[in-house]
Each structure stands twice: as structure tokens, then as C-alpha cells.
Amino acid sequence: MSIPIEVPGLDTILPEIGKGSVVVVEGSADAAKGFFVRHMALTAGRKGLPVTFVTSRDRDELRLQLLTEQGPTVLPESWIQIHEKDSVEHLEEFVGAGGLVAMDSFSFLTLDLSPDALARTLRGLRNQCRHRGTAAVLGTDRGMFGPRAEAIAVHLADGFLQFHTREGADGVQRFLRVPKWMDGRFIDRNVYYEFDGKRLAIDLRSRVL
């Protein structure tokens, strides 16, 4: 089953993450990237899909974040499995049948891998996701990959989202880019987004220059 994006504005142009797809979500210091990964995990859970979440952070802290962000929604019993890791080399073990594999710190967890090993890891993940009909959303921190490793991640992913922030004359400007998507479409412009720590929304009418 595909997992709907369900982010206001974004879902009009990218309605869903298809089963078997691997999507990389890149961000800077802004917390929007991690929020989006958790949002997709919660969306999958609301649809009754199993979620496997791999994190380099504290498991209890992640559970608290998910509990806060899910609001009054009652999720199925044991809807998520959380794996706390310092590094990963093989991701196939986390891919169950259907549902979602989410990682909030993919670039950190694979930091010690050579570019060739990173390529093998991503190919293995893609093959298992396609075989089992499972989607994967991998959060990466901008600047942690070297140029070759980043090119490998972009090339092997089915979709690539970038959350950007920069200082402008009117304060912090936030904008989203979609350099690659699984159906061949892409957005070659900087689309403004709003994020207050609790809600993420895309404004397709505004463009950041």
C-alpha cells in the first residue's frame, strides 16, 4: 500500500510514497527534515501499516516525540518497532512485509561506509523494499556525505527532497526543493514552506529567490 504524504500543499504535487520506493529527505539544522520522517511514520501507522524506525538517538526520546505529534489519534497496538543504532551496514534486516522503514539519521549511521559500501547498502535496501512492497524514508543531514556518497544516494533513491534554510533580509527563509521524484517529475524552484515545530505546510504560491 502506498503511503499518502498528507502535508498541506506538498500533497497536491506529490500525493504519496509508493510501496517499494526509497525516498531520501535532506535537511540542514532546521528540524523540518526529522519532523517529516516522523510524520510519514505516523501516517503509515494511522493507515494500519507496520513501521520500523531506525534511529541514532535515544529510543525513549523518539517515542515521546511520536506520542506528542500523533495528538489524540489512537494508533494500533505495537504499530512501531524502534531500533537504536550507532551505525548500520546492512538495512535488509529492517524491511518487513509492507509498511515503512524510517531512518532519521541515515547519513550519520552510514558515515563510516566507503562510497562503494554505501551503494551496496542502498541497492540491498531497494531490492528488499521492491520485493516486499515496503517504502523507506531516509533522513540525511546536509554536509555529512562527501560529494561521491551524496551522488550515490541521489542516484539510487527513487525520490529526493531537500529542506533548505537561509538568512534573508526578513529573517530566516525556508524553502523546499524536489530534484527527483519517482514518476519523473521534479520541481526546479525553491518552494516556500512554514514550520513551527508542530506543523509543516508548503506554500506553492510563494517562491524564494
Image (tube, rainbow, N blue to C red):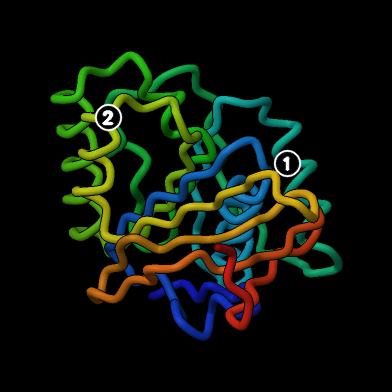
Quadrant position of the N terminus in the picture: bottom left
At 70% from the left and 50% from the top, the residue drawn is 168
Please determine whether, in this image, residue 25 is positioned above or below residue 21.
above
Q: Is residue 82 left or right of residue 70?
A: left
Quadrant position of the C terminus in the picture: bottom right
Q: Which residue is mark 2?
A: 147
Q: Is residue 78 left or right of residue 89?
A: right
Q: Choose the circle earlier in sequence order: 2 or 1.
A: 1
Which residue type does callout 2 highlight? Pro
At 53% from the left and 32% from the top, the residue drawn is 83
Q: Is residue 147 left or right of residue 106?
A: left
Q: Are marks 2 and 1 in contact (CB under 8 Å)?
A: no
Q: Give SS at disc 2.
A: helix
Furthest residue in direction top, as rendered = 112
Q: Which residue is mark 1?
A: 63
Q: Indicate the position of residue 20 as horizontal and vertical percent values.
A: 27, 63
